[in-house]
Image: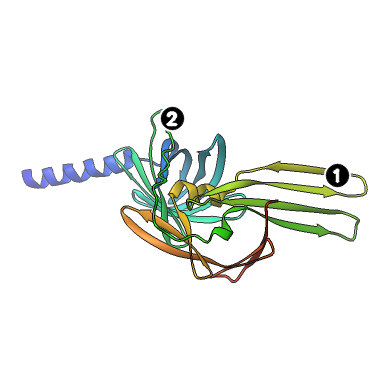
Amino acid sequence: MKKTLIIYTLFIFSKLTAMAQSFDGNWYGQVQGTNGTLQAEMNLKTSTNQVNGQVIVSSNGAKELYTLRGNMNSSTVTGTLAYKDGTIFNFSMQLNKGKIQQNINYNGQVILQGNYTKEAKITIQNTPNNKPDGLYRDPNLVGKWTNQENYSSNGGFYGGSSTSIILNADGTIDDGGSSSYVSGPNSSGNSSGGGNSAIAQVKAAGAKWFTKGNILYWRVTVNGKTTDVANSKYYIERGALLLTDVNTGKKLLYYKGN
């Protein structure tokens, strides 16, 4: 009888402990890749076995917002992070003793790891690692490249947008900024800025580009494991760069120095 009572008491205690842990609320911490860390916070709300909310990542003074949707199974949540440009990342996270540990995946590869608590935010310095890696990089790819798109309509409206990337000689990548304009019979406007989510994620993960033949690759190291991911076939002629995604076949045309 005494043994049964002890087992029952432990069972009740474990159930209460699980119930006391909740993903609800504001969480503060960072996401980390091999190239350093970025400040991050999560605002989460649970409903039955669903978790919804936002993830806000701070990069170079700008705040990038991602919409989080996940399914909860006990103390584990799996789901997606969606950026405003339509980019989708997968994630999994686990709550244990008041701390959340999170993995963020893109194209099947873990690119970032997050750690959160409900304590106040701590300022984190990005600590880049730019040691020589011995990888070959086609020197013709180094520099700023801009993709330009234009459009028009039968109603007399026309406009365009451009996005730029900077491929550095050490294998890192930078956001070259973006701009857009629109004009019509009674209105016109333009805007410019930065904040490319894909570039921010690549930089935070410490990924570096390199080339083999006519293929552009990314090298990513997570938990000591190095993975080379083929990104695009590339072709350069007269200051123009054509990238063809190796998975989807999507083509993007860039021009150098714009």
Is residue 1 in view? no
**Which mark is first along the chain, 2 or 1?**
2
Q: Label 2: few (<14), some or many (≥20) within 10 Å?
A: few
Left or right, 78 with reference to 179? left
Q: Are marks 1 and 2 in contact (CB under 8 Å)?
A: no
Q: Nearer the viewer, residue 240 or 98?
A: 240
Residue labelled with disc 1 = 188
Q: How far apart in space, not on screen, are marks 1 and 2 (Cα)?
A: 41 Å
Q: Is residue 119 above or below residue 141?
A: above
Left or right, 183 with reference to 117? right
The residue that appears at 87% across and 54% down in the rendered structure is 157
The structure's colour scheme is rainbow
Q: Is residue 117 above or below residue 136?
A: above
Identify which amino acid the numbered label 2 is placed on. Thr
Residue 193 percent location from the top left of the image: 67, 41
Residue 125 in which image quadrant: top left
Residue 217 percent location from the top left of the image: 48, 63
Residue 78 percent location from the top left of the image: 42, 54
The residue that appears at 54% across and 46% down in the rendered structure is 66
What secondary structure is found at the residue carrying circle 2? Answer: loop
Residue 200 percent location from the top left of the image: 53, 47
Q: Nearer the viewer, residue 70 or 126?
A: 126
Looking at the image, the residue that sits furthest to the left is 2
Identify which amino acid the numbered label 1 is placed on. Ser
Is residue 203 in view? yes
Task: Find residue 123 and name its label.
Answer: 2
Left or right, 76 with reference to 148? left
What secondary structure is found at the residue carrying circle 1? Answer: strand
Task: Find residue 47 and name its label.
Answer: none
The residue that appears at 44% across and 37% down in the rendered structure is 126
Q: Label 1: few (<14), some or many (≥20) within 10 Å?
A: few
